[in-house]
Amino acid sequence: MGAWPALFPRYAGNEPGDPDRMARAIVGAVDAEEPPRRLLLGGDAPGIAISSEEGHLAEARKWAEVSRSTDHPTDPATA
């Protein structure tokens, strides 16, 4: 868990999120014509998610050829 237990007392009760606003955002998302598959809540959430997904995409691109190489060959001569 690292440093989190030591930081928790300073953070607890000082969260930037407003539960009432979050509840309204959730209801609005659920009622949306095209609701999100994942609803990011909190000012820092989009940046964290985008950074994480960019890392996933970079890794997927880096290893894409290895991923493709695991299929059965389409040309029996290359088996």
Image: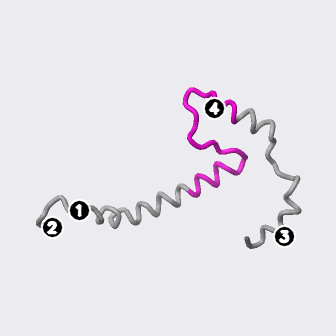
Tell me how far mark 4 sits from mark 2, CA to CA: 50 Å
Q: In this view, does 43 lie above or below 57?
A: above
Specify the amino acid type for callout 1: His
**Marks 2 and 1: in contact by CB < 8 Å?**
no
How dense is the environment of label 3, judged by Cα within 10 Å: few (below 14), some, or many (20 and up)? few
Q: Are marks 4 and 1 in contact (CB under 8 Å)?
A: no
Label located before the other in sequence (4 or 1) = 4
Q: Earlier in the sequence, mark 3 or mark 1?
A: 3
Q: Which residue is drawn at 58% across and 33% down?
A: 35
Tell me if 3 is positioned left or right of 55 in this view. Answer: right
- Looking at the rendered structure, the secondary structure element under dot 2 is helix
Q: Locate the C terminus by quadrant.
A: bottom left
Q: Mark 2 points at which residue?
A: 78
Judge the density around disc 4: few (<14), some (14-19), many (≥20) Cα neighbours within 10 Å.
some
Q: Does the magenta stretch include residue 57?
A: no
Q: Residue 6 carries which label?
A: 3
> Which kind of residue does numbered mark 4 sit on?
Val
Q: How far apart are marks 3 and 2 (CA)?
A: 58 Å
Residue positioned most to the bottom: 2
Task: Give the image location of residue 26, x and y in percent.
Answer: 69, 36
Q: Name the residue under label 4.
A: 30
Q: Which of labels 3 and 4 is toward the front?
A: 4
User: What is the span of residues highlighted in magenta in the rendered image?
Assistant: 26-52
**Residue 14 left/right relative to 38:** right
Name the residue tied to disc 1: 72
Q: Does the magenta stretch include residue 50?
A: yes
Q: Earlier in the sequence, mark 4 or mark 2?
A: 4
